[in-house]
Image: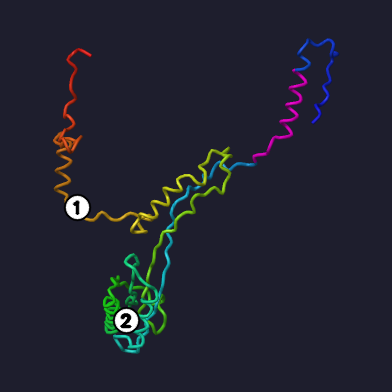
Amino acid sequence: MRPPRISCRRSPSQLRPGLLSRALLAAFLGAALAGCESDPGTADWTTARTPSEPQVQTTDFRHDVPFAAGRPVPAPGDEAALRRFVFELGTDPQDRIYVLAAAPRPGDVPSDDLITRQRQAAVVRTLAELGLATDAARTAAENLEPGRPVAVLVRRTRVTLPNCPDWSGDPGSNTDNRPLRNWSCSSAVNLGMMVVEPNDLVFGRSPGPANGEYLARSMENYRKGRTRDLIRDVASGELFPTVAPTSSGGN
């Protein structure tokens, strides 16, 4: 690349020694850098790149159980079809199984609701014989197939691990100061492989009932300073001192 010409009001002989060379060098470098400058484009400063994390996917499998008119139990062939559905699906303890039946509507005859409950109980009993725990629930009649008043819904939740390592981006260019795609990728894989209940990654569990008297007494002891000392070394039984030692004046 040829350096551009420089027009000066003074002749080169009137410039001090070294000034001309520095001016030519600055012009040459400026032209070279201008030609090599890359356009970073418009950066999105509002949306941070989501780091790699395990994804929870839920899939529902449904089987509608037919019943003959007025019959509280399915026919032998329909019960066999239900068992075949369970065997072919290959259920496991992590699956949630719901037995759905139509909820009563205003104006329904009580005997109709009774037979609906009997049909639901018959399906629950069949699944229990297969060693499956189920949740019986009622739903709107519009959610069920005509002539099939009971439906078995198997909800399966699985964890999909991120593809690690992920160097799909440019690791040498991080001008937007965002996390690289491979950031925390291995930790996300380890978490996804260790979790037992996939739904724990979606929402927490209810802590359940607690002993209010025990908790209140613990808070009272804490406020009064009646807490146990921390164990520093279990083997030697050494404890953290309850009161920091005071200096006797010498170092």
Residue 210 image label: 1
List x then y, in percent, for residue 19: 76, 14
Say left or right for 66 vs 47.
Answer: left
Residue count near mark 1 (Cα–Cα under 10 Å), binned few <14, some 14–19, many ≥20: few
Residue 13 in the image: above or below residue 24:
above
List x then y, in percent, for residue 55: 44, 56
Tell whether label 1 touches label 2 (CB within 8 Å).
no
- As rendered, which of 123 and 232 lies closer to the eye? 232
Q: Please name the residue that numbered disc 2 is placed on.
A: 108
Residue 34 in the image: above or below residue 72:
above
Look at the numbered disc 1 and give the secondary structure of its residue: loop
Residue count near mark 2 (Cα–Cα under 10 Å), binned few <14, some 14–19, many ≥20: few
Please check the rendered image and state whether residue 46 is part of the magenta-colored stretch, yes or no: no
Residue 4 in the image: above or below residue 170:
above
Q: Amino acid at mark 1?
A: Ala
Q: Amino acid at mark 2?
A: Asp
Please state the extent of the stretch shown in magenta in the rendering: 22-40
Q: Give the image's coloring scheme.
A: rainbow
Q: Residue at x 71, y 31 (%)?
A: 33
What secondary structure prevails in the magenta region?
helix
Say left or right for 63 vs 216.
Answer: right
Q: Residue at x 41, y 72 (%)?
A: 61
- As rendered, which of 82 and 20 lies closer to the eye? 20
Q: Residue at x 33, y 54 (%)?
A: 204
Look at the numbered disc 2 and give the secondary structure of its residue: loop
Q: Residue at x 38, y 78 (%)?
A: 85
Mark 2 vs mark 1: which is more N-terminal? 2
The quarter of the picture where residue 245 lies is top left
Q: How far is the residue under mark 2 from the one under mark 1?
A: 42 Å
